[in-house]
Image (tube, rainbow, N blue to C red):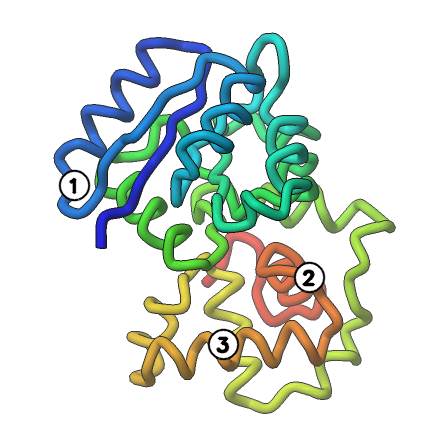
Amino acid sequence: MTIRVGIADDQSLVRDGLRVQLGYAEGVTVIGEAANGDQAVTLARLQRPDVLLMDVRMPVLDGIEATRRIRAEPDLAAVRILILTTFDLDEHVFGALTAGASGFLLKDAAPEEIVHAVRVVAAGESLLAPAVTTRLIREFATRPTVGRPQPETLDSLTDREREVLVLVAQGLSNVEVAGRLLVSPLTAKTHVSRILTKLGLRDRTQLVVAAYEAGLVVPGGS
């Protein structure tokens, strides 16, 4: 099955680069481009891409508001949004995640990382770029409204669920977790779903925060 991708970025060079890189990937096709957030929303409505690569800082309508509007439309629930960012993480990234983005990817990521990210998000998973996960955690950890659990809440997890949580905190997808633990991707996905339910969390981003706060993973460590 072909993964249909849309690209939203106000820089034509960035769009051209992404289109070329994705063009070499088997089973991936770029079906449309947008130069601002308003066009990105229109692209989502008309083309219904499986994955929409969304820049944050764009004219007319920024990527955060564009993401929020797309997520607010039930008919566009299948459109997965992957935020394009730089190492300079700021409020924009967190706003985009809160608005409903499936994760974020560095603009200078290697071609194979971009293709991998698109495949992961298209499969219905969330993605956190490992290179910036630690900075994401440090920022989230200072926010009292994140809704993170107390460390003792993790007592409800089984040993295997804790193991899965650590791997998720390291930025691994369900498929990668499955490979590491020698289980099926479906089993890995089930573990992640149960962990979310037990901890009362919304997504993988909050799972990562919980793992760091509980001391299961040390920033900068493995």
Q: Is residue 185 left or right of residue 133?
A: left
Q: What residue do we see at 23% from left, 48% from top?
A: 2
Question: What residue does disc 1 label?
Answer: 25
In front of the other: 14 or 77 = 77
Q: Residues within 10 Å of mark 3 (few under 14, many from 20)?
A: many
Depicted 72 relative to depicted 58: above or below: below
Locate residue 30, reporting x and y percent. Answer: 27, 31
Q: Kindly state the secondary structure of the residue where label 2 is placed.
A: loop
Callout 3, which amino acid?
Val
Q: What residue do we see at 54% from left, 43% from top?
A: 76
In front of the other: 156 or 175 = 175
Q: Kindly state the secondary structure of the residue where label 1 is placed.
A: loop
Locate residue 136, reporting x and y percent. Answer: 61, 44
Question: What residue does disc 3 label?
Answer: 164
In front of the other: 177 or 11 = 11
First in residue order: circle 3 vs circle 1 = 1
Callout 1, which amino acid?
Ala
Depicted 13 relative to depicted 172: above or below: above
Depicted 97 relative to depicted 213: above or below: above
Depicted 147 relative to depicted 6: above or below: below
The quarter of the displayed image where residue 156 is located? bottom right
Q: What residue do we see at 81% from left, 58% from top?
A: 147
